[in-house]
Image (cartoon, grey):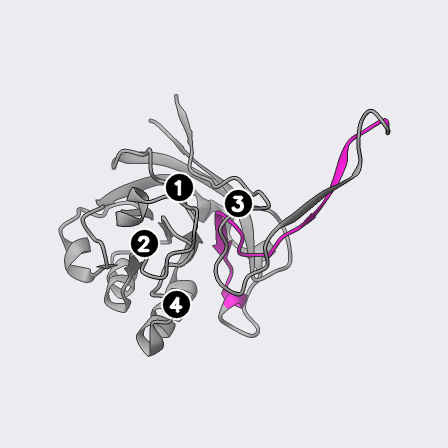
């Protein structure tokens, strides 16, 4: 068994989606002055590798603590979509044999670093979202901080809403060093009553 960490490290200089707060991590006790080291952590709910909860797009939607954890563990396919430099559309997905409940999209985003925010990141289209739902996908993940197009207008809003209503959405995966294949995925968000939460996501070779 081999475990591959596909999570971003949450640090104060981590890239954040525009408008989201930057993390602040401060030690309020520290060895050797104190007997223990302890820190105060101030981060947004969509920082780094994170899951969206339905409340992210629905006023009275479920929060992270209500999510079905069984849908964050199991067989997962990492799809090779690195040739998709603008978007992942239905035609791109139809070329893949999708037969897992968890699908992770490795796009052209993985050819770049998570340093400065890129507005032109590769995204999943509305038709792509609809196709994954049709194929019975329960959880979808992507290698950037948003599943849908930046300032993408009505179609992006619809894609965001449908994805969060019909699937679980994981954003901010680090798939740069992952070969497209089938793995066991495990990614559990912290138990918290919010619209989203960071998670530690890993792939396990079978």
Q: What element carries label 3?
A: strand
Secondary structure beneath label 1? loop
Residue 169 percent location from the top left of the image: 42, 56
Cα distance, mark 1 to mark 4?
Answer: 21 Å
Q: Mark 4 points at which residue?
A: 160
CA gap, disc 1 and disc 3: 12 Å
Name the residue at 64% across, 53% down. Answer: 192
Q: Are marks 2 and 1 in contact (CB under 8 Å)?
A: no
Q: Is residue 37 shown left or right of residue 6?
A: right
Q: Residue at x 14, y 59 (%)?
A: 91
- Is the residue under label 4 in contact with that under label 1 (CB below 8 Å)? no
* Residue at the image point whose x is 31% and y is 49% from the top: 109
- Other residues around mark 3 within 10 Å, as few (<14) / some (14–19) / many (≥20): many
Q: Mark 3 points at which residue?
A: 199
Q: What stretch is highlighted in magenta?
A: 34-56
**Which label is found at residue 137?**
2
Q: Where is mark 1, residue-wise?
A: 174
């Amino acid at each position: 068994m081999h475990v591959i960490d596909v999570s971003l490290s949450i640090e104060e200089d981590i890239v954040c989606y525009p408008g989201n707060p930057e993390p602040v991590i401060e030690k309020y006790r520290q060895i050797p002055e104190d007997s223990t080291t302890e820190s105060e952590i101030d981060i947004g709910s969509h920082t780094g590798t994170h899951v969206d909860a339905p409340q992210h797009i629905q006023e009275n939607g479920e929060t992270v603590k209500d999510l079905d954890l069984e849908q964050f563990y199991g067989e997962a396919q990492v799809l090779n979509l690195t040739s998709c430099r603008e978007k992942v559309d239905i035609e791109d997905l139809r070329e893949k044999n999708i037969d897992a409940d968890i699908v992770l999209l490795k796009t052209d985003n993985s050819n770049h670093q998570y340093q400065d925010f890129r507005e032109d990141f590769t995204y999943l289209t509305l038709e792509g979202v609809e196709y994954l739902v049709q194929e019975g996908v329960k959880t979808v993940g992507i290698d950037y901080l948003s599943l849908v197009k930046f300032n993408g207008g009505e179609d992006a809003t619809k894609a965001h809403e449908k994805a969060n209503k019909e699937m679980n959405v994981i954003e901010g995966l680090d798939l740069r060093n992952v070969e497209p294949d089938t793995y066991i995925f495990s990614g559990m968000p912290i138990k918290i009553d919010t619209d989203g939460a960071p998670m530690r996501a890993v792939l396990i070779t079978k």
